[in-house]
Image (cartoon, grey):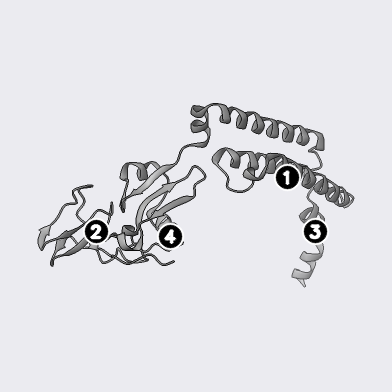
Amino acid sequence: MYLLQTLLEFNWKELLLGSEEWSFLPETILRTLIMFTVIVISLRLLGKRGVKQLSVFELVVIIGLGSAAGDPMFYKDVGILPALVVFTMIVGLYSLITYVIGKNKEFELLVEGKPICLIKNGVFSIANFKKEILGADEFFAELRMQGVSQLGQIEEAIEESSGNISVFFYPDEEVKYGLPIMPDSLKASFQKISESDHCSCTFCGYTEKLKPAGKVSCPVCKKFRWVKASNKKRVT
């Protein structure tokens, strides 16, 4: 009985409409239609590149357009005209900056960034990899989605300014031993070399055939953890 009385006394209007009246719902529909149309037109003006693979700059533009469009759709105190001014400014700035980018290479690098080599000849480019906010597990997952199971299959891997990873492969007959990147493949790491075999450094991917020895330091990164290397061909 108490629960029923509580439900009956609950302010459902405030929950559903906030401080607005029911009469604002038709206006919400009209506002949404207007701003949706403005978004479509603006994205059409930005061109295909603006909505396909976004750079940091383009992502800022899209977020700005979304913010400008969202509030006028359901906030009564936010007018349509100020939002249109914001849209006009964002599209205008995008066009201006894109024009300057096309004319000035240094400005392009400042705004868009530049491609970075992450793997060279099956080994991590450690200095470059540290510059990027990219976890090893995330990076390995990207490579696995392109059919990579070990780094010896890769001649070069480049992170593009869009954030996508471009991978250039060795022909099957030139595939080398490399660091395996399949899930849990690094859990069987070791420090002491108990038998002669191809081993890969778990930190940088450097690979060579090691002879039985005690604690062995990687000549590239000076780390001591190794894993048995793989020479599997790429899955295509």
Q: Quadrant of residue 152?
A: bottom left
Element type at mark 1? helix
- Residue 57, x across and y down, in percent: 57, 37
| Mark 3 lies on residue | 12
Q: Name the residue at the left extreme.
A: 213
Q: Nearer the viewer, mark 1 or mark 3?
A: 1
Please state which amino acid type lies under the numbered disc 2: Ser
Q: Nearer the viewer, mark 1 or mark 2?
A: 2
Looking at the image, residue 34 lies above or below residue 3? above
Please state which amino acid type lies under the numbered disc 4: Ala
Element type at mark 4? helix
Looking at the image, residue 45 lies above or below residue 145? above
Q: Determine the residue positioned at 38% across, 44% down.
A: 117
> 97 or 105: nearer the eye?
105
| Mark 1 lies on residue | 70
Q: Are marks 3 and 2 in contact (CB under 8 Å)?
A: no
> 179 or 1: nearer the eye?
179
Which quarter of the image is occupied by the C terminus?
bottom left
Label 1 – label 2 distance at C-alpha: 51 Å
Mark 1 surroundings within 10 Å by alpha-carbon count, few (fewer than 14), some (14 through 19), many (20 or more): some
Residue 127: which disc? Answer: none
153 horizontally vs 219: left or right: right
Element type at mark 2? strand
47 horizontally vs 117: left or right: right
